């Protein structure tokens, strides 16, 4: 969740560090800090609040030091405060460390250090690391890398960290176990960060650390025993500009048509009325051997997986389900060798999903990844899958990655269906529908002004219901998630048929219901649901592509018709806009909602 930036080279480090942190603000944080080495001493600055507060604290007193580390912290151990902000240093002020992750034996290590007379100055788990590194150096470790390696032998838990020694400012040492670290290769300079977003202003040549790897960086390059060759990332600094939008969420909502075009490029096979997903590395015989599909994800990725499971069952006629990756490994799951497991994560670094992948592989399961970030941990761990190519998603709330995930699952369902019993005619219908999907999403976005008016009308509601049946059920869950995470309005999502089994008691004039109504065989039942709510005085916002009776709902938001199987993608677009405009009406920090981070890399 936190952000890491480091630099070693020939330029003053402070400005590079602060700019890098600004690129990572979307990850979620409560404080920020940096340490720069100069004349064999550290200049450390820390501040509670935003990166702008750190920039103000640095002021004009920028160190000329050419090596430094920086961090944005999201509190896990200890309250948000200056003394708990990173970087942390040893007692002598020689060693500085920035760290993402959680040290599970931190209390034990803190007690040992305190017993040895070390005066700890923070409440964090991270603070033990610089003391352990300093102790290793004092004990005779021949290099900073060896000292870090020795210190980490005492540590249990997850970490992505960068270590700086003021007496040897020509190098940085980095290490990873469960929390992302990526190196950036410059011309006579090296960068390190927890996310490529902090690097692309300076370089597109990167190296991703794998778990257990340690490396030393100097201005001339990097050394590590198991590091792979550099990768060229498919993004640049312009991808992180607002391009005239008021915030990144707005930009990313409107980027969905282009993102879907990239998602579909080269993956539609009109000749054979099927999809091409070569990254799965599964031939037709292997595809026919799949007896079940299980999607694993968290948050929006889970809801996308629920839609995907419905598509697989409908088109391929094999059982499918979606599970919370955060729960999967803890229940000692039964792993079936004839099941295809699909790990879903925008960042490719979600710790719960990565742990589920590792558990599956340990038990012999076949698992593929669906991720948006090339070179990410889940992509590397799976070794097979589908890249979304949605482009960088900066806002915490997922929009274009979500719609790209569902589209990728439509492709998977089509592929599985065509090697089984899905006819060529139905395959051609779906190929044509997918081809037209980006334009249909473009049309759905044209309702933005209408949605904004609805949002302003209901933004003051203390709570909302989201309801849908079958194809609309997971869409409703995702819509409720969006409203909660960016507007802070409480929302509950239910399968519409469950309304009479308890939740109907909550319906009154102050409880708006958002009802997702696809134009499908359940239309009459969805209309009946709306009538039941209206009979009890509840306001209704209908999101639909169907013809419904005039006056049935208090507000109607329409999307275009396409193919019924693709309705969830189109019906989800107005729900993104509804949450967005509610949040704006309430004055929320849309890209950085409170308490949340874009990439969840700690439990």
Image (cartoon, rainbow, N blue to C red):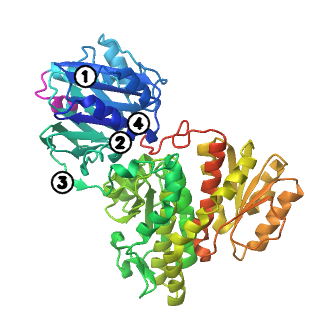
Asked which secondary structure carries label 3, the reply is loop
Asked which secondary structure carries label 4, the reply is loop
Q: Residue at x 24, y 14 (%)?
A: 92
Is residue 85 toward the left or the right of residue 424 in the image?
Answer: left
Which mark is drawn over residue 110? none
Is residue 192 toward the left or the right of residue 195 in the image?
Answer: left
Q: Residues within 10 Å of mark 1 (few under 14, many from 20)?
A: many
Give the mark, 2 or 3, whose residue is nearer the N terminus: 2
Which segment is the magenta one? 140-148
Residue tagged by mark 3? 229
Report the front residue among 258 and 207. Answer: 258
State if disc 2 and disc 4 touch (CB < 8 Å). Answer: no
Residue tagged by mark 1? 63
Q: CA distance from mark 4 to mark 3?
A: 26 Å
Which mark is drawn over residue 2? 4
Residue tagged by mark 2? 179
Looking at the rendered image, the disc whose residue lies closer to the viewer, 2 or 1, is 1
Compared to residue 214, the image places residue 12 above or below, namely above
How many numbered callouts? 4
Q: Residues within 10 Å of mark 3 (few under 14, many from 20)?
A: few
Instruction: Tell me, yes or no, if residue 417 can be seen here.
Output: yes
């Amino acid at each position: 969740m936190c952000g890491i930036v480091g630099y070693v080279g020939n330029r003053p480090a402070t400005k590079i560090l602060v700019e890098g942190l600004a690129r990572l603000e979307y990850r979620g944080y409560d404080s920020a800090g940096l340490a720069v080495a100069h004349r064999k001493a550290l200049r450390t600055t820390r501040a509670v609040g935003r990166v702008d507060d750190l920039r103000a604290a640095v002021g004009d007193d920028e160190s000329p030091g050419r090596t430094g580390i920086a961090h944005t912290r999201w509190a896990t151990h200890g309250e948000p405060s200056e003394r708990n902000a990173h970087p942390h240093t040893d007692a002598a002020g020689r060693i500085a460390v920035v760290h993402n992750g959680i040290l599970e034996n931190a209390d034990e290590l803190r007690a040992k250090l305190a017993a040895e007379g070390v005066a700890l100055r923070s409440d964090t788990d991270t603070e033990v690391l610089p003391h352990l590194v300093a102790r290793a150096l004092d004990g005779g470790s021949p290099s900073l890398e060896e000292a870090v390696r020795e210190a980490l032998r005492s540590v249990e838990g997850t970490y992505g960290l960068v270590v700086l020694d003021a007496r040897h400012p020509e190098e940085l040492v980095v290490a990873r176990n469960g929390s992302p670290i990526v190196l950036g290769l410059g011309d006579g300079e090296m960068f390190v960060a927890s996310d490529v977003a902090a690097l692309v202003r300076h370089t597109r040549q990167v190296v991703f650390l794998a778990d257990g790897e340690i490396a030393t960086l100097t201005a001339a390059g990097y050394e590590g025993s198991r590091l792979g060759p550099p990768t060229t990332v498919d993004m640049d600094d312009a991808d992180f500009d607002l391009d005239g939008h008021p915030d990144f969420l707005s930009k990313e909502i409107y980027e969905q048509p282009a993102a879907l075009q990239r998602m579909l490029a080269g993956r539609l096979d009109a000749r054979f009325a099927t999809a091409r997903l070569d990254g799965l590395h599964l031939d037709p015989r292997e595809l026919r051997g799949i007896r079940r599909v299980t999607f694993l994800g968290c948050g929006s990725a889970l809801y996308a997986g629920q839609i995907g499971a419905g598509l697989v069952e409908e088109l391929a006629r094999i059982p499918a389900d979606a599970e919370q990756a955060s729960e999967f490994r803890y229940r000692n799951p039964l792993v079936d060798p004839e099941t295809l497991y699909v790990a879903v994560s925008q960042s490719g670094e979600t710790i719960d999903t990565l742990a589920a992948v590792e558990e599956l592989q340990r038990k012999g399961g076949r698992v593929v990844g669906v991720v948006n970030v090339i070179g990410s941990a889940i992509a590397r761990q799976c070794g097979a899958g589908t890249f979304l190519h949605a482009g960088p998603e900066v806002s915490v709330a997922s929009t274009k990655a979500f719609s790209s995930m569902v589209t990728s699952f439509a492709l998977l369902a089509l592929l599985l269906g065509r090697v089984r019993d899905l006819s060529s005619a139905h395959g051609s219908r779906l190929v044509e529908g997918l081809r037209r999907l980006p334009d249909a999403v473009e049309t759905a976005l044209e309702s933005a002004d209408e949605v904004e008016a609805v949002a302003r009308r209901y933004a003051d509601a203390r709570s909302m219901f989201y309801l849908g049946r079958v194809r609309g059920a997971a869409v409703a869950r995702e819509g409720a998630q969006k409203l909660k995470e960016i507007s802070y309005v409480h929302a509950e999502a239910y399968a519409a048929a469950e309304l009479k089994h308890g939740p109907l008691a909550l319906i009154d004039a102050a409880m708006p219901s958002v009802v997702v109504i696809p134009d499908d065989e359940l239309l009459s039942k969805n209309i009946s649901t709306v009538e039941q709510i209206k009979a009890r005085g509840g306001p209704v916002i209908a999101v639909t592509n169907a013809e419904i009776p005039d006056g049935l709902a208090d507000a109607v938001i329409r999307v275009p018709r396409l193919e019924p199987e693709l309705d969830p993608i189109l019906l989800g677009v107005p729900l993104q806009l509804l949450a967005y405009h509610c949040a704006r009406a309430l004055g929320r920090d849309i890209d950085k909602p409170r308490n949340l981070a874009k990439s969840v890399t700690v439990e």
